[in-house]
Image (spheres, rainbow, N blue to C red):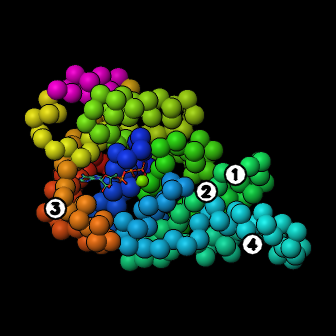
Amino acid sequence: MPKLIGFIGKGGTGKSTLTALFLKYVLEKNIKPILVIDADPNSCLPELLNLKADKTIGSIRQELLNKNNEISASFSKYDYCEYALNNAIIESKGFDLVAMGRTDGPGCYCYINNIIKTMIEKLKRNYKLIIVDCEAGLEHLSRRTLGDINISFIIADLSRKGILTGVKQVELMKELEIKTEENYLLINNVIEDKSIDNFENLIQQTKNEKLKYLGVIHHDENILKYELNQNSLLDLPDDSKSYHDLKNIITKIDLF
Ligand SMILES: Nc1ncnc2c1ncn2[C@@H]1O[C@H](COP(=O)(O)OP(=O)(O)OP(=O)(O)O)[C@@H](O)[C@H]1O
Ligand SMILES: [Mg+2]
C-alpha cells in the first residue's frame, strides 16, 4: 500500500506552501510514482505549482448529478466516474495531481460519494507516495474519502493559539477515528529564532498529545516572490530559507 502523508492545520498556516516544498523534496529524492491530492475546496495548490486544475472531483460529482438521467445503461455511473476522474488527473513532471474541489452540497449523495471513495481507493494503489494538502476542516478525512494517514504534518504558526489549534487537530483526528502512525508538529513562517524560546513550555506539552515537534520553517521572502510572479515553488532555489529548513527537518524522520 502507498504511504499517505497529510499536511494539516488551521487556515493560512502554510499547508499548501509546505505541501509544495515537501513535493520538491521527494521529487529530488526520486521517489515515484507520486500522487498529490489537493483536498481543499478552495483549491490553491495547483497555482503554487504553476498548474491548472480545470476539472475537480467535485465538478465530476456535479456533472454526474446533472447527467443522472442521461447516462445510458451501457455506460454505468461508475464507468462515467472513472472516465471523468482520469480526465481530472493532471500529469506533471514526476507526479500526478488531482483536486477534490467542492464535493459537499445540498442533500445526501451517498451513492456517488461511495463511488468516489472506491475510485480513490483504486487510484491510490497506482502510487508509492500520496501527499495531501488538507483543508482546515478535515472534511475528506472525516468522510473517509481519502482513507487513513500514515504521517500527518501539523502546521502551526508561532502563537499560543496556533500551537493549541495544532493539538486540537490531533484530538479531532482521534475523535473522527482517523488513524495516523505519526503526527509531527512544524511551526512555519518564523521570523525571529529567539521568539521560539517563549513557546518552549507549550511545545513540550504537545508531546502529551503524541505530537512530535520537529522544528521551525523560517519566513522566506522567496515564497512570496514566487507566488506573486506565479513561479512554481518547485523551482525555489535549494538554499532558499524555507526549503533549506524543510530539508533539514525531514531528514530527522524515517519517511520510507
Ligand atoms: N515560510 C513562509 N515564508 C513566507 N511566507 C509564507 C511561508 N509559509 C507560508 N507563507 C505565506 O503565507 C500565506 C498562507 O500560506 P498557505 O496558502 O500555504 O497556507 P494554507 O494553510 O494552505 O492556507 P489555507 O488554509 O487558506 O489553505 C501564503 O501567502 C504564503 O505565501
Ligand atoms: Mg491551502
Please name the residue that numbered disc 1 is placed on: 105
Which badge, 3 or 2, comes first in the chain's sequence? Answer: 2
Q: Earlier in the sequence, mark 4 or mark 1?
A: 4
Assess whether mark 2 and mark 1 are in contact (beta carbons under 8 angstroms).
Answer: yes
Q: Which residue is drawn at the image coordinates 63% and 44% (left, top)?
A: 143
In the image, what residue type sits under mark 1?
A: Gly
Q: Name above or below for residue 158 compared with residue 82.
A: above
Q: Amino acid at mark 4?
A: Tyr
Q: Is residue 200 visible?
A: yes
Q: Residue 247, percent across and down?
A: 21, 55
Q: Which residue is mark 4?
A: 80
Q: Are marks 3 and 2 in contact (CB under 8 Å)?
A: no
Q: Residue at x 34, y 50 (%)?
A: 14
The residue shown at (46%, 55%) is 132
**Count of picture labels:** 4
Q: Which residue is the site of mark 3?
A: 240
- Secondary structure under tag 1 reads loop
User: Of tags 4 and 3, which is closer to the observer?
Assistant: 3
193 in the magenta segment: no
Q: Secondary structure at mark 2?
A: loop
Magenta residues span 198-208
Residue 209 position, x and y percent, is: 38, 26
Q: Are marks 4 and 3 in contact (CB under 8 Å)?
A: no
